[in-house]
Image (cartoon, coloured by chain):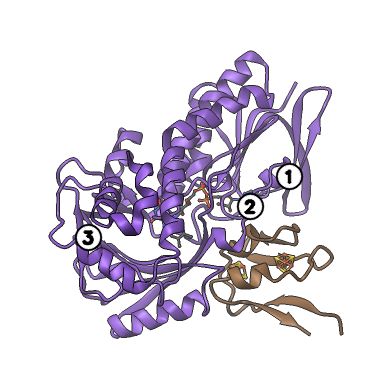
Chain colours: A purple, B brown
Amino acid sequence: MTDYDIIIVGAGPAGSTVARSAAENGLNVLLLEKRQEIGVPVRCAEGVGKEKFNEIFKDIDKKWISAEVDGAKVYSPDKKTEIVLSGDKAGNEAGYVLNRKIFDKDLVKLATLAGSDLMVKTTATGLKKNKDQGTIELTMQNSDEIFTAETKILIGADGIESKIGNWAGMNTTLNLNELESCVQYQMTNIDFDERFCHFYLSYETIPGGYLWIFPKGKNVANIGLGVLSSLSKKSPKEYLDNFVNNNFPDGKIIEINAGGVPVGYPLKSAVNDNVMLVGDAARHVDPITGGGILNAMIGGLFATNIAIESINKKDYSVKTLKKYDELWKNDFGKTLHRNKKVQEKLLTTDDKTLNSIFHSMENYNITEANTKKLLYEIIKRNPKLLWDLKGLFI
Amino acid sequence: MERKININRYKCACCGACIAVCNFNANEIINTFLEIKDKNCTLCFSCIKACPFRAIELEE
Ligand SMILES: Cc1cc2nc3c(=O)[nH]c(=O)nc-3n(C[C@H](O)[C@H](O)[C@H](O)COP(=O)(O)OP(=O)(O)OC[C@H]3O[C@@H](n4cnc5c(N)ncnc54)[C@H](O)[C@@H]3O)c2cc1C
Ligand code: SF4
Ligand code: SF4
């Protein structure tokens, strides 16, 4: 007898989504988290699109949400032009800024209430294929105790620092041009338009990434930036300090966060025999926005469906699990691919060109805007510059 | 003395960015502590460039 149908490594949004829905479907599930406290330290700006989030959760707990925004404002490098994306109609830019310390912990609670086992401060340290049984033996450590468990399916939901993929023979190591290196301050005592999330672009002062201000409540915001590791000349912290000193000299930092965001092309495959990767472990993050929370949960639900199917069929081979690849590729995978192409183009665009692109977008303010429509409009208005991207949007 | 990398504990924020770019399984966060496995480390310096706080330093 195997110990578990599914073992999930990592209790972020990806892992706890799988644990909850697998347990709700009657499977025997273990969720593993190496941290001693779920969700801490936060490595996130906490923004999610409202529409998709509402689709995933029937009952949203108010405590999960720190602030609600009407849309986004994107600023040109010279700050002379801003593009406003407001979502009060049907667009997907209206959003929530979550409180992930509460949200992540609540998702884990929901998984345990559905019947999932949970171990915290317990690290997955290695895996072995059990050829005779066609299962996996996972080694874990908690305190001095080293132990193993056998599982039919192993879910790698171990985030940016994922090891499961590499252990299972899929190379998920990122190159320096595939990693945004991020620093964020949660600040109080700052004055800004709290109805919007704000995005600043500049090749010179934020190379290969962007700077964000996401409201967290009255006079509080997450202010952070990510820069592409292969391009940044200074440390991300220096770039951020510069912006904060110039724009919010009276602001007080009440929390410091950091993190890495994967921004390469999506993996060709996120599965191997017995193993599926979800969330950041599968590098399911939008290369332009850096958003990964929603994909982590949507991908988690896809992976659960395929896990259930494979357990019913008693077939955990890569062939069966590949259906998970089809599901995510046909869903958010398309956007990941398209936005990677656009991001590559952005990486070769200097500030002068960026300014002129923004300038071409003056008076663009449609309430039904979303990122795809905006990119389409930008290309339409700058055909010479961006001609090679045209095909992506037709 | 042999060259190796060291973590400046006053700078490190335990964010995991350095682990995503290490191709040699030479680093790991154990709860709130980043550990370097010197015997796996090839001194490729990828992690140094990935670190948001430049907390990884070369000891010569
Ligand atoms: C600075 C920053 C800002 C961001 N802003 C946004 C944003 O505004 N909106 C958005 O949608 N996304 C954002 N993201 C991305 C988002 O944070 C991730 O996409 C999301 O957290 C992915 O969830 P996950 O469950 O895959 O991984 P995680 O939330 O990272 O969870 C992985 C878990 O696995 C655990 N783990 C790892 N290894 C092991 C092991 N061996 N054994 C046991 N447990 C293990 C870790 O401790 C961790 O708790 C941002 C990221 C960063 C760094
Ligand atoms: S120097 Fe290279 S091998 Fe050593 S820990 Fe850093 S990334 Fe890994
Ligand atoms: S990237 Fe830097 S701050 Fe993050 S864990 Fe590694 S050494 Fe620490």
Image quadrant where one finds the N terminus of chain A: top right
Label 1 CB less than 8 angstroms from ligand 1:
no
Query: Helix, strand or loop at disc 1?
Result: helix
Can you give x and y, in whole percent of width and height, for residue A278 in the image?
55, 40
Query: Number of labelled discs?
Result: 3
Asked if marks 1 and 3 fall on the same chain, the answer is: yes
Name the amino acid, label 3. Answer: Phe
The residue that label 2 is drawn on is: A121
Q: Which amino acid, mark 1? A: Trp
Q: Nearer the viewer, mark 2 or mark 1?
A: 1
* Image mark 3: chain: A
Q: Earlier in the sequence, mark 2 or mark 1?
A: 2
Depth check, front residue: A158 or A62:
A158
Q: Which residue is mark 3?
A: A196
Residue A7: image x %, image y %? 64, 35
**Circles 2 and 1: CB atoms closer than 8 Å:** no
Vertical relation: A234 (above or below) A70: below
In the rendered image, the residue lying farthest to the top is A313
How many residues crowd around disc 2 within 10 Å: few (fewer than 14), some, or many (20 or more)? some
Q: Residue at x 68, y 23 (%)?
A: A316
Marked residue nearer the N-terminal end (3 or 2):
2
